[in-house]
Amino acid sequence: MSAYEMKPMGSVNVDRVNSSSKEEQGHDATSRSTTSAKMYFFALSYMSLWEAMATNIGLAFYNGGPRAMVWGFFIVFSGVLCQVASFSEMSSVQPIAGAQYHWTWHLAPPKYRRSITWMQGWMTWFSWISILASVNVAANITTTLIVMSYPQYVLQGWHTVLIMWSYMLVLSLLNMYAFWIIPWMELLASLLHVVLWIVFAAVLLTLAPRHPAEFVFLEKANGSSWDSDFVSFNLGIILITWGFVGFDASAHISEETRRASSSIPRAMFWSICLNGALPFGMIIIFLTTLGNVDDLLASGYPLMAICLSATNSIPGASAMVGGFLCTIISVCIGSVASSSRLTWAWARDGALPAYFAKVDPKHRIPVRSVWLPLVIVGLLSLLNLANYTAFSVIISLSTFGLYQSYFIAIACMLHARLTGRIPEAPWSLGRYGVVINIFALIYSAWLGIFMIFPSYLPITPSSMNYALPINALIWLIAIVSWFGWAEKNWAGLDVELINKIVADGERDTKE
């Protein structure tokens, strides 16, 4: 059964969303302004992998140490390649903004299609809200630069909140009223992504003190009080996964991309492949040049400490980290774009209020769905006023939640493959599909187990891993809403609309 012949389980008419016209509401509302090249640069800059490794480098010395970062990279990279290869094939079959929850609907056993899609959709949406909350990283880097440049400055929690709000306001306005410029910004960010790597490598390898190869490749560390080095090693490689999560961002821009069935899978897959060498190289460089480990951990922000150790200049180190901040901001721009399109799709499919499914007819952007995630994150950021740990609880959901989202979609894909229900697509895994899907599932499940372990012992409110309780809350919301309302009232996805979107995605023009 092909993607275009799937029969609906309770048709959902587009008009049920609201009484808006097709031009305001339907799949024709957005323009396909993103070319294949622009989409690739979007994916490349969004998956700023070496920057993510740099952000987390200090945490490696609490679990696993350099050994976990170096050798664990190959485990994570191979697992993520199988995840993204599976998603690339699915996006080639159905390039649509809802991405994995749409693919779950298409590939799940028909008997359980509605319930699995409902659970999948909510987990995916909440996880992307959590990813958007990572704009807090940009705010923290900004405050670090201020503190380094003005030592007399006393940082307060409300300062971080205001900086976050400022970033979110600018990012939202860009996404609502100047979306056409974002692909060009991502192109510049992609170039900066590579140029900065060269700058960091040159400065650190030329000026910074060096550790021997034995330290880089064989040194282990366990500052978390776990008795088992095995557990500590696996907790250490969790740090690497944070940089690789969110590769589905490109898929959520499918309905604004030309020739989406080929553009989206290529962008997703090759952005990971071509990005892979940069983070591994930077891990080696950072571990070689990070200086005194105790000073690094005491600094509060290891990246700045490494740059300062190498340059012996606050302006020089600030310039390096300032460039780094620009790439992080480009990631935040992509997070707003992807989370808003996912929100738009989830509202269009009847799970969120129809109010958020409306597309602004002038700007051809789902403006309301841009605001909703940002308002939610803005309100949650107020937790910083009480305790930073309280806000980090929200961020902790992102990786664990999306890994569950990936697992559900790939499991449904494997079931469909084994039962002969995988349609042909421009980007196909062919005879390797079963092996790749199985390895992706094993990897996702294995890492998922350790994502709920506490990073440090003994467990205290500040050291507790809140991913599991927050995740349980999301599942509770999804299950209660299913049995309380959706089981009887949610008809599922509109197959006719899906087929129109998929067919429309093959055009090579903006309108």
Image (cartoon, rainbow, N blue to C red):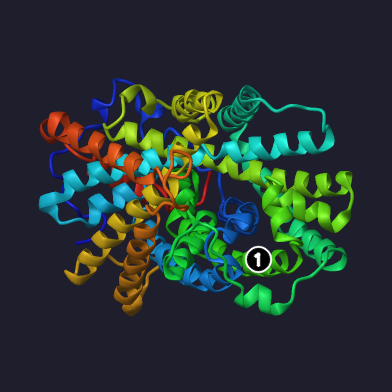
Quick one: 93 or 418, which is closer to the camera?
Answer: 418
Quick one: 114 or 67, which is closer to the camera?
Answer: 67
SS label for mark 1:
helix
What amino acid is labelled 1 in the image? Answer: Ile
Task: From the image, tell me which residue sits under label 1.
Answer: 283
- Horizontally, residue 106 falls left or right of residue 275, namely left
Q: Is residue 490 above or below residue 203?
A: above
Residue occupying image coordinates x 65% and y 66%: 283
- Horizontally, residue 462 falls left or right of residue 296, namely left
Asked whether residue 502 is in view, the answer is yes
Rendering coords of residue 218 (x, y %): 61, 77
Quick one: 18 or 509, which is closer to the camera?
Answer: 18
| Mark 1 Cα shell of 10 Å, populated few (<14), some (14-19), many (≥20) | some
Quick one: 156 or 266, which is closer to the camera?
Answer: 156
Exactly how many numbered labels are in the figure? Answer: 1
Residue occupying image coordinates x 75% and y 72%: 211
